[in-house]
C-alpha cells in the first residue's frame, strides 16, 4: 500500500516540468519571431540601430489620428 501513496507526488512534479518546458519553448519562439521583426544592424560605430522605419511608424500614427501634425513635425525634426 505504501508504494502507491508515494506515486501520487509524481503527477505534480511531471506537471511542473511540463509547464517549465512549455514556458521555455514559448519564450524561445517569441524571441525568435521578435528577432526577425526587429533585426539589429551594426552601423560601424558600435551603435545598435533597429531596422524598423521610425518615420514610417510615426507617419502611421499621424494618419490614424494618434498624434497631431505639430507633434509629427517635432518628431520628424528629432529623427532627421
Image (spheres, rainbow, N blue to C red):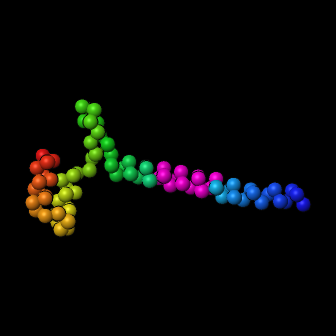
Image quarter (top left, top right, bottom left or bottom right) of the N terminus: bottom right
Q: Residue 67 in the image: x percent, y percent?
A: 17, 63
Query: Can you tell which quarter of the image residue 48 is in?
Result: top left
Q: Residue 25 in the image: x percent, y percent?
A: 53, 52
Identity of the residue furthest to the top in this view: 45
Q: Residue at x 64, y 53 (%)?
A: 17
Residue 20 appears left or right of 79 = right
Magenta region includes residue 25? yes
Identity of the residue furthest to the right in this view: 1
Classified by dominant secondary structure, the portion drawn in magenta counts as helix
Q: Which stretch did the figure color magenta?
A: 17-29
Q: Residue at x 50, y 55 (%)?
A: 26
Magenta region includes residue 31? no
Residue 9 appears left or right of 74 = right
* Count of numbered badges drawn on the protein: 0
Query: Can you tell which quarter of the image residue 66 is in?
Result: bottom left
Q: Residue at x 81, y 56 (%)?
A: 6
Q: Residue 27 in the image: x percent, y percent?
A: 48, 52
Residue 37 appears left or right of 45 = right
Q: Residue 3 in the image: x percent, y percent?
A: 86, 56
Q: Is residue 12 above or below residue 49?
A: below
Q: Residue at x 20, y 62 (%)?
A: 61
Residue 23 appears left or right of 14 = left
Q: Is residue 31 above or below residue 60?
A: above
Amino acid at each position: 500500500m505504501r508504494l502507491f501513496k508515494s506515486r501520487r507526488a509524481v503527477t505534480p512534479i511531471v506537471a511542473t516540468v511540463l509547464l517549465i518546458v512549455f514556458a521555455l519553448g514559448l519564450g524561445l519562439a517569441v524571441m525568435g519571431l521578435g528577432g526577425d521583426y526587429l533585426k539589429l544592424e551594426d552601423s560601424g560605430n558600435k551603435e545598435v540601430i533597429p531596422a524598423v522605419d521610425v518615420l514610417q511608424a510615426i507617419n502611421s500614427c499621424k494618419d490614424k489620428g494618434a498624434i497631431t501634425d505639430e507633434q509629427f513635425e517635432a518628431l520628424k525634426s528629432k529623427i532627421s
